[in-house]
Image (cartoon, grey):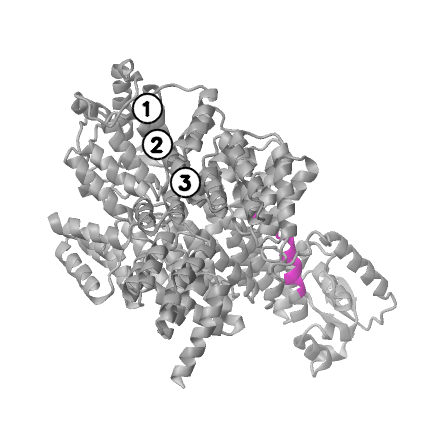
């Protein structure tokens, strides 16, 4: 059994996503903790003045390096540099997450997978949208984007297609790319603005190339017009006329009658007009030009030669006389005319008035693809925000939950407290029909009202979410009770929640707010044990140590979470404490890093912008030239100090903000820290600052690759190479091609690409990565000597991670001691070394492996391999219950594919086929194409069916 389980574990790809950034939750309106008042200065100005005063007094003394030992004059430093004192525990509270959270997340995933598999094909889009809402609360944004693509893939109606396509575009934030238009096409039907305007269910075609580049619209129209002119006749048998004023419009009676039933009845029924050759149409509100256009359409069925304003009049005419074919043609024609916000804002009014579905859809598409910029336009928001606006959209089939879900999410990102966000969420509530939709809408409105300090309304919305079935909203109910002065009631509510359900970390975290002393610390420790990714317990314990004047211990505590989950609030807290310790180098490093994650971050109770603090701290530390910065970057990069590297890059960009190369390096570091949103922002800036077309194409390729568009990324790399051969273009192409199951032929091609990359100019940081990747491909091809050469060359230029590859080569050569020693070198050099401990465990005996993996879990509890290893050992020792418990402990805070698959395999070996089936379903919800899980799932279902029959 041990061999099987260990083989299973090592064949699975490890996923190490971390939870997203969480804002440091302190009350900006709270009273200052210390320091004086006076004057009319703002809080930020006073803090800045104090910092600058301290700079002048201590400018000479502070040129030496700082340590974490409290200097003798610390009280003076704290008073002058931190006029509002150090952070205090009373102003700290955790943020309530504005997403769906579940008590039994595995069962939720399993149920969702079953419903996706069993639901009718026309309903799949809605179920995938629910999956989007559930995945929104997970740390890996790729899961959310994959579900969003599936929802778009299975969409049926035009409205849903345009909303989901615009959402996919927004996820890449292409609005920030200079020189791009909102209506630009990505080349695939999935997001093509023209393909989305075609109704119908065709999931197989969404990833095909669209027709945009193949048939220019104008040429297409010209061809049709020429054909039409050839087909039309000039010998029509005019047999009647419509008179409007003094003008006479000659017509073909049966052609006009074919426009609609009212015309047919008038011209061939019992009305007097059926016997007249001339019909007076002066009192019907149509111009002579429009009537001539209607007559021409009755013969040609074409509108292309008409002015758009004339077509608008024809649309009104078609509605008045029930001319469905004419209305459809006007609708399609006008929809094709919408190209920018001005057009959309003007034409959508006509569309709503005349119930023109496609015209409204086209206008909405432009407005949605211009988000978030269009959200700042009051004329645009007027279309969406009010109840009356939603009713108008509903009348033409364009008010939906997915529309307001998209809009409200952007509203919350832009400004959670704004009236616009509240109104969009109120429309979301009105659009909610299914249980999960009501849970989400009620809960998010509660979160926003809590942020706005409207506690009574917030409590009511949270209660509504609970009644709809969202248990996590009880946290909101308790918080609002506490805010309204009912602390004991809040405590009882959380106590009851812990008693009624299987406890999870956020329950204890919330209850800790409503108790004190040892009980509070016990709850915080339990919360960390159940879910080590929650940042509030670490921050609280660190600040408590600050209050006890144990600053070094406080740094150690906050380092525990920064070591595996980097967020602006935790970096701010460490910088805050470092200033108290007069470790200005450390403080400046952390402030620069947090500004990389969030450039608009406000420090110290939200009163001082981080950039201002950088300016003040900068003279207190040793000054570096740009050349010094490059040396520092090499040192930190080679020591796997990602936060330190980020700080150096931020410093370099302050001197040269338009350096696209540095922006790209910044994005790589951010991806290492699982900060994908910030990484994408850096990539977009790298692209915008590019001075050459071939460089711009490479960065566009990386943006596409990192958002799941591998084929498009390859095309960008090839286009870049066709313009100029460069390291980055070859590297991108090799990287994208290697992201699949490589056969010998494709492996040889990847090797060739990496060798081409290494022949091109680049710096040591990137060449080290290329050598490391080349060594990995050689290992897969069993060319171990060539792989060893690559890794040694990478180490010669300080690519420290190559120790891991070299260790793998030694291991495959049966030199286990050498492999172990190689990983020990990496552990000694790397600042972030949890992965090194994990990998070294493969090259030693069981006891030493357990020690290394224990250290890996202590440094980074998000790494799943240690849990799987320990569980496999327990299973091998016939301790099945303990093995299941070990896996369940990790699944409780990280529902990971490998963990779920292994637990399913354990259940299967124990004959528990129901739990095997459940865990397989949950795993397949995360990755529906995982072959091993699919095989195990089929076997488990067969056995469950056998037991039931």
Kindly identify the residue that appears in the image at 62 percent across and 58 percent down.
189
Residue ID for mark 2: 591
The x and y percentages for residue 535 are 28, 46
Earlier in the chain: of badge 3 and badge 2, it is 2
Residue 24 location, quadrant:
top left
Q: Are marks 2 and 1 in contact (CB under 8 Å)?
A: yes
Residue at 20% over, 62% down:
498
Q: Which mark's residue is nearer the viewer, 3 or 1?
A: 3
Instruction: For the residues labelled 3 and 2, say whether their Cβ atoms are less than 8 Å apart.
Output: no
Using the image, determine if residue 124 lies above or below residue 673.
below
Q: Position of residue 560 (x, y in %)?
A: 28, 42
* Residue occupied by mark 3: 823
Quarter of the picture containing the N terminus is: bottom left
Task: Give neighbour class at mark 3: few <14, some 14-19, many 20+ (Cα, 10 Å).
Answer: many
- The answer to which of marks 3 and 1 sits earlier in the sequence is 1
Residue at the (43%, 28%) spot, across then down: 635
- Range of residues picked out in magenta: 329-343
Q: Position of residue 521 (x, y in %)?
A: 16, 48
Q: Secondary structure at mark 1?
A: helix
Read off the residue under disc 1: 617
Q: Residues within 10 Å of mark 2 (few under 14, many from 20)?
A: many
Chief secondary structure of the magenta portion: helix
Front in this rendered view, residue 578 or 231: 578
Query: Does residue 242 appear anywhere in the picture?
Result: yes
Kindly give the residue lying farthest to the bottom in the view shown: 949
Q: Position of residue 868 (x, y in %)?
A: 36, 57
In the depicted view, which residue is nearer to us: 324 or 530? 530
């Amino acid at each position: 059994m041990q061999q099987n389980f260990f083989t299973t574990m090592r064949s699975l790809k490890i996923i190490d996503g971390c939870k997203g950034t969480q804002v440091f939750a302190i009350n900006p309106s709270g009273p200052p903790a210390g320091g004086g008042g006076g004057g009319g200065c703002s809080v930020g100005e006073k803090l800045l003045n104090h910092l600058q005063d301290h700079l002048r007094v201590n400018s000479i003394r502070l040129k030496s390096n700082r340590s974490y030992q409290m200097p003798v004059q610390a009280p003076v430093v704290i008073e002058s540099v931190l006029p509002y004192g150090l952070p205090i525990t009373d102003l700290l509270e955790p943020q309530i997450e504005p997403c769906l959270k579940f008590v039994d997340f595995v069962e939720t995933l399993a149920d969702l997978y079953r419903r996706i598999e069993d639901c009718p094909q026309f309903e799949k889009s809605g179920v995938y949208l629910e999956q989007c809402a559930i995945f929104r609360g997970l740390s890996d944004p790729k899961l959310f984007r994959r579900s969003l693509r599936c929802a778009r893939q299975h969409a049926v109606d035009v409205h849903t297609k345009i909303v989901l396509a615009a959402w996919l575009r927004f996820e890449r934030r292409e609005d920030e790319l200079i020189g791009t238009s909102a209506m630009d096409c990505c080349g695939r039907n999935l997001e093509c603005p023209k393909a989305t305007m075609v109704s119908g269910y065709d999931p197989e075609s969404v990833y095909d190339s669209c027709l945009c580049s193949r048939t220019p619209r104008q040429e297409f129209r010209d061809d049709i017009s020429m054909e039409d002119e050839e087909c039309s006749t000039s010998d029509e048998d005019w047999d009647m006329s419509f008179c409007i004023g003094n003008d006479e419009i000659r017509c073909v009676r049966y052609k006009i009658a074919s426009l609609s039933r009212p015309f047919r009845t008038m011209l061939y029924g019992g009305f007097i007009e059926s016997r007249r050759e001339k019909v007076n149409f002066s009192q019907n509100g149509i111009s002579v030009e429009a009537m001539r256009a209607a007559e021409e359409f009755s013969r040609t069925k074409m509108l292309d030669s008409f002015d758009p304003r004339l077509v608008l009049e024809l649309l009104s005419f078609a509605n008045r006389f029930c001319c469905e074919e004419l209305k459809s043609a006007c609708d399609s024609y006008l929809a094709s005319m919408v190209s920018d916000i001005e057009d959309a804002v003007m034409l959508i009014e006509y569309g709503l008035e005349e119930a023109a579905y496609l015209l409204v859809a086209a206008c909405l598409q432009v407005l949605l693809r211009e988000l978030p910029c269009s959200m700042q336009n009051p004329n645009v928001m007027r279309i969406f925000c009010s109840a009356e606006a939603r009713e108008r959209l509903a009348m033409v089939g364009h008010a939906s939950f997915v529309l307001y879900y998209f809009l409200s999410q952007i509203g919350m990102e832009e400004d959670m407290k704004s009236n616009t966000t509240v109104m969009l969420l109120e429309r979301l509530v009105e659009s909610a029909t299914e249980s999960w939709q009501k849970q989400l809408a009620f809960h998010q409105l509660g979160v926003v009202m809590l942020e706005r300090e409207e506690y009574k309304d917030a409590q009511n919305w949270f209660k509504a979410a609970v009644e709809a079935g969202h248990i996590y909203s009880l946290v909101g109910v308790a918080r609002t009770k506490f805010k309204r002065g009912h602390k004991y009631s809040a405590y009882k509510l959380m106590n009851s929640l812990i008693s009624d359900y299987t406890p999870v970390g956020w329950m204890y975290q919330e209850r800790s707010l409503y108790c004190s002393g040892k009980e509070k610390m016990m709850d915080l420790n339990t919360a960390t044990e159940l879910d080590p990714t929650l940042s509030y317990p670490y921050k609280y314990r660190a600040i408590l140590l600050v209050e006890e004047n144990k600053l070094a211990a406080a740094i150690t505590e906050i380092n525990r979470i920064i070591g595996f989950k980097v967020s602006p609030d935790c970096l701010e807290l460490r910088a805050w404490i470092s200033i108290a310790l007069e470790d200005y180098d450390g403080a400046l490093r952390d402030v620069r890093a947090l500004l990389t994650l969030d450039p608009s971050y406000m420090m110290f109770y939200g009163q001082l912008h981080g950039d201002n603090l950088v300016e003040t701290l900068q003279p207190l530390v040793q000054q570096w030239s740009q050349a010094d910065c490059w040396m520092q970057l090499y040192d930190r990069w080679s020591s796997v100090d990602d936060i330190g590297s980020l700080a150096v890059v931020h410093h370099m960009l302050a001197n040269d903000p338009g350096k696209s190369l540095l922006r790209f390096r910044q994005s790589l570091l951010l991806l290492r820290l699982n900060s994908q949103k910030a990484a994408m922002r850096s990539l977009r800036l790298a692209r915008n600052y590019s001075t050459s077309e071939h460089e711009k194409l490479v960065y566009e390729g990386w943006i596409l690759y990192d958002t799941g568009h591998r084929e498009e990324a390859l095309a960008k790399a090839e286009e870049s190479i066709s313009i100029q051969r460069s390291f980055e273009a070859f590297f991108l192409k090799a990287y994208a091609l290697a992201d699949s199951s490589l056969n010998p032929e494709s492996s040889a091609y990847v090797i060739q690409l990496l060798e081409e990359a290494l022949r091109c100019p680049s710096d040591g940081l990137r060449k080290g990565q290329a050598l490391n990747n080349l060594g990995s491909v050689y290992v897969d091809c069993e060319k171990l000597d060539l792989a060893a050469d690559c890794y040694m060359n990478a180490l010669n230029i300080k690519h420290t991670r190559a120790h891991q590859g070299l260790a793998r080569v030694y291991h495959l050569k049966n030199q286990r001691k050498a492999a172990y020693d190689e990983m020990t070198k990496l552990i000694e050099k790397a600042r972030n070394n949890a992965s090194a401990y994990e990998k070294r465990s493969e090259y030693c005996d069981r006891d030493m492996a357990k020690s290394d993996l224990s250290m890996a879990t202590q440094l980074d509890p998000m790494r799943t391999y240690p849990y799987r290893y320990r569980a496999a050992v327990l299973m091998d020792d016939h301790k099945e219950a303990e093995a299941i418990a070990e896996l369940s402990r990790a699944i409780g805070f990280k529902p990971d594919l490998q963990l779920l698959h292994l637990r399913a395999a354990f259940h299967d070996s124990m004959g528990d086929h129901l739990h095997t089936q459940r865990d397989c379903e949950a795993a397949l919800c995360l990755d529906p194409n995982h072959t091993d899980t699919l095989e195990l799932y089929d076997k488990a279902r067969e056995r469950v069916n056998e037991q039931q029959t």
